[in-house]
């Protein structure tokens, strides 16, 4: 009688796949697992450090264990004389004379001894006060690996998304379909509602939205469609009527909204537009770097916001309601009209044990301009953090806009000045199609001072330089400053060393 031949190798958890027996309390269990262990190869390491650590551990002497469905349990009588890699979750009370890596949650039970690092990839490390780890405890919750057998018996590890795909075709993201609101001096409160329609197990996402802008008294429609052609390739098409700004790099939406409502301080200039954009993104990854180039096209029809001069009314703010630098601050008019453009650029992100980097370059080539002439505009953003002396940190932030062409419509202008850019200047008092700005920070922790609930404060030395203008850059303004940070509370003092600008003292909340 012929023996049935399976059409594919058995996967982990299925009959026929080599696994460690569920009872692992015996001292011979690991020896049995060594004999059963398949060859393992990391086929896709994914972004970040997790894949690099896993690949390096597999390249060194190690013991590999494929855990049963219920996970691996190592009792106190079990000792591994080398690095132990567990394909699946693990509960360990024994001894590991090397690193311990689990592809899932790692539970360290009383009596456990790990002479190296304890690492959970795709899960968390649950420590015990009665366990000992000589190295570090690291949990990579956002990066998991799927284990799939190949034809030659090799177990292939490939990075996978950890977010479970919702089986429902229609979901309501945020709070029952309402997205995080925003607040500014033009729209007042912007409240967005819209479902998310998922097709083909989530590879295609369609998001129709409507946004109510309370001060303008209008409802703006929007539509976004995203196709994940592969794990690394994304196609996105979006169309919306909205209120747009080129100054969102200064502060994030949450901080800008809170300061606009509380202090009337809106660090953005605005214009209204109908905009349609199509982009194709492709991501290349190593264990330390992610490079994501993109190409696309954009069609925009712009016009000035209703209050581009002194206005009789303005949205509400708790403070500075009548301050010309507050919620009633002048918003410059724009040239308006249609701009059809080609887009190209790339984003580079890097992360090591001590350094991080995030750099984006976008180039817009306008090919059809209704009110002006074709132009090319490049926008550059960078955030880099590096180690300094001992536990000190060095950080660099930069933003630049460079434009070539004849008459550039002013809806492509960018601005600097005031809090978030150059504190010694008035808020967004310089603008144009050329902009350069950079800030360097050197942060020194003060561990000798420990405050209840807030921890140790830090002192930051700051140097800021920047300016913006039409057709060319003006003489750049420099600021020197000192910052004291306690938890998220920041106290800043900055001044212009040339003596031409004002001195600025502020207290605020910040994440960057």
Image (spheres, rainbow, N blue to C red):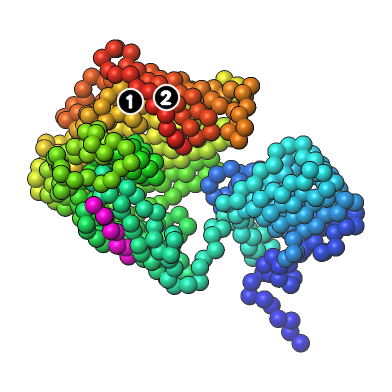
Residue wearing tag 2: 492
Q: Say above or below: 421 vs 24.
A: above
Q: Residue 173: name its quadrant.
A: bottom left
* Residue nearer the viewer, 208 or 156: 208
Q: From where the camera sits, is residue 463 visible?
A: no
Q: Say above or below: 437 vs 142.
A: above
Disc assigned to residue 423: 1
Confirm whether the magenta stretch covers residue 310.
no
Q: Say above or below: 341 vs 9.
A: above
Label 2 environment density (alpha carbons within 10 Å; few <14, some 14–19, many ≥20): some
The x, y position of residue 186, in whole percent, is: 23, 46
Under circle 1, the secondary element is loop
By secondary structure, the bulk of the magenta-drawn segment is best described as strand
Under circle 2, the secondary element is strand
User: Which numbered disc, 1 or 2, marks the residue that appears first in the sequence?
Assistant: 1
Task: Please report the residue visible at 48 percent of the width from the left and 32 percent of the height from the top.
Answer: 489
* Residue nearer the viewer, 72 or 151: 72
**Callout 1–callout 2 Cβ contact below 8 Å:** yes
Of all residues, the one furthest to the top in this rendering is 498
Of all residues, the one furthest to the left in this rendering is 371
Quadrant of the image containing the C terminus: top left
The x, y position of residue 213, in whole percent, is: 26, 55
Q: What span is in magenta? A: 207-215
Q: Residue 91: name its quadrant.
A: bottom right
Task: Please report the residue visible at 42 percent of the width from the left and 32 percent of the height from the top.
Answer: 508
The x, y position of residue 131, in whole percent, is: 80, 44
Relative to residue 356, is residue 437 drawn left or right? left
Task: Please report the residue visible at 43 percent of the width from the left and 65 percent of the height from the top.
Answer: 176
Label 1 environment density (alpha carbons within 10 Å; few <14, some 14–19, many ≥20): many
């Amino acid at each position: 009688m012929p023996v049935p031949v399976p059409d594919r190798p058995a996967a982990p958890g299925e009959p026929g796949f080599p696994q460690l027996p569920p009872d692992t309390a015996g001292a011979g269990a690991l020896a049995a697992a060594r004999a059963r262990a398949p060859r393992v190869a990391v086929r896709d390491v994914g972004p970040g450090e997790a894949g690099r650590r896993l690949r390096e551990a597999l390249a060194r002497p190690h013991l590999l264990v494929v855990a049963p469905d219920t996970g691996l349990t190592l009792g106190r009588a079990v000792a591994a004389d080398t690095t132990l890699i567990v394909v699946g979750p693990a509960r360990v009370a024994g001894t590991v004379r090397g690193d311990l890596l689990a592809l899932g949650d790692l539970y360290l039970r009383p009596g456990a001894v790990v002479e190296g690092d304890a690492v959970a990839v795709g899960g968390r490390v649950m420590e015990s006060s009665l366990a000992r780890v000589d190295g570090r405890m690291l949990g990579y919750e956002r990066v998991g690996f799927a284990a799939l057998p190949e034809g030659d018996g090799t177990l292939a590890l490939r990075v996978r998304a950890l977010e479970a795909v919702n089986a429902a075709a229609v979901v309501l993201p945020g709070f029952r379909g309402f997205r995080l609101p925003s607040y500014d001096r033009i729209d007042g409160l912007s409240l967005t509602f819209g479902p998310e329609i998922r097709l083909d197990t989530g590879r295609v996402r369609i998001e129709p939205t409507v946004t109510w802008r309370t001060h303008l008294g209008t409802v703006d429609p929007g539509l976004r469609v995203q196709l994940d052609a592969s794990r690394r390739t994304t196609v996105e098409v979006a169309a919306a009527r909205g209120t747009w700004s080129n100054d969102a790099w200064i502060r994030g939406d949450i901080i800008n909204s809170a300061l606009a409502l509380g202090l009337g301080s809106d660090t953005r200039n605005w214009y209204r537009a109908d905009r349609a954009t199509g982009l194709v993104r492709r991501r290349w990854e190593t264990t330390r770097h992610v490079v994501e180039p993109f190409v696309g096209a954009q069609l925009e029809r712009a016009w000035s916001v209703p209050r581009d001069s002194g206005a009789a009314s303005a949205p509400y703010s708790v403070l500075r309601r009548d301050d010309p630098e507050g919620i009633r601050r002048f918003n410059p008019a724009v040239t308006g009209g249609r701009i059809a453009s080609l887009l190209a650029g790339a984003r580079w992100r890097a992360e090591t044990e001590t350094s991080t980097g995030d750099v984006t370059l976008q180039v817009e080539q306008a090919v059809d301009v209704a009110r002006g002439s074709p132009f090319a505009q490049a926008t550059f953003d960078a955030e880099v953090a590096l180690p300094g002396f001992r536990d000190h940190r060095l950080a660099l932030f930069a933003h630049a806009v460079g434009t070539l062409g004849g008459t550039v419509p002013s809806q492509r202008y960018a601005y600097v000045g005031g809090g978030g850019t150059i504190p010694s200047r008035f808020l967004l008092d310089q603008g144009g199609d050329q902009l350069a700005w950079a800030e360097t920070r050197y942060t020194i922790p003060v561990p000798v001072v420990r405050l209840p609930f807030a921890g140790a404060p830090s002192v930051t030395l700051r140097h800021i330089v920047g300016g913006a203008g039409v057709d060319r850059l003006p003489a750049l303004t420099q600021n020197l400053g000192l910052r004291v940070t306690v938890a998220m509370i920041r106290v800043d003092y900055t001044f212009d060393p040339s003596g031409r600008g004002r001195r600025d003292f502020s207290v605020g909340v910040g994440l960057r």
